[in-house]
Amino acid sequence: MLRTEIEKALAVLKDGGVILYPTDTVWGLGCDATNEQAVAKINEIKGRAADKSFIILLDTDNKLQSYVNEVPDVAYDLIEYAENPLTLVFPGAKNLAKNVINADGSIGIRIAKHDFCQQLIQRFRKPITSTSANVSGAPTPLFFDEISDEIKEAVDYIVDLEQELKTNKKPSTIMKLAPGGQFSFIRR
């Protein structure tokens, strides 16, 4: 089942589409983080401002240097020892769609610790976006059945995994990193 769902989601991502998928945090809307049209489609689905940046997911921290200019050593320690899902905001984003990057040139990156996400990203060989599956300004749905029909009908594919799960997941902790390795919390 996992392999089949990865194949279906992969085909949609390669075609520039948007998937609704389970993550190590809440259900997310995902697309190719290097494809500006796909990112714009997520903004349209969410009714969100085009200048709002995204979090992207990678399958391993070995790929960080492909998408940011400088990775302070502390980033690897933070990722390794984080007990909960952790998004790190790095300055100097590169090799990504312009509309996925924050106005200040930074990008939020989380190393996915979720089987489906890791395998999908590994097969796709590019980062995918991860934004909560809600209309902008509406509460973040904690479970699949809390996601609005409006969102479900707007995506190109809904991953058929974990839809009945009721484990209490929450958005990731977000920390901002400075080039010298200093960091601060944006969301705990």
Image (tube, rainbow, N blue to C red):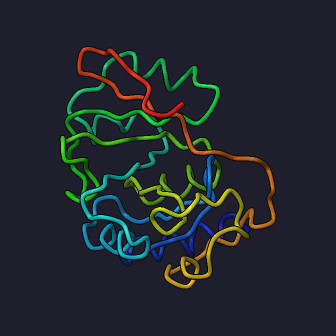
Residue 33 is left or right of residue 98, and the answer is right
Residue 139's spot in the image, x, y percent?
58, 59
**x and y percentages locating residue 63 in the rendered image:** 37, 39
For the residue pair 139 and 65, the one nearer the viewer reads as 139
Position above or below: 145 against 142: below
Q: Going 55% across and 64% down the picture, which residue do you hit?
A: 133
The image quadrant of residue 183 is top left
Q: In terms of depth relative to the viewer, which is nearer, 146 or 160? A: 146
Number of marks in picture: 0
Q: Position of residue 71 (x, y in %)?
A: 30, 25
Horizontal relation, residue 91 to residue 119: left or right: left
Q: Nearer the viewer, residue 119 or 166?
A: 166
Residue drawn at x 40%, y 48% as measured from the top left: 55
Which image quadrant: the C terminus?
top right
Q: Quadrant of the N terminus?
A: bottom right
The image shows residue 161, relative to residue 77, as above or below, that is below
Residue 16 position within the rendered picture, expressed as x and y whole percent measured from the top left: 36, 75
Residue with the most extreme bottom position: 153
Residue occupying image coordinates x 25% and y 14%: 180
Residue 37 location, quadrant: bottom left
Q: Could you tell me which residue is drawn at 25 percent across and 47 percent down?
A: 102
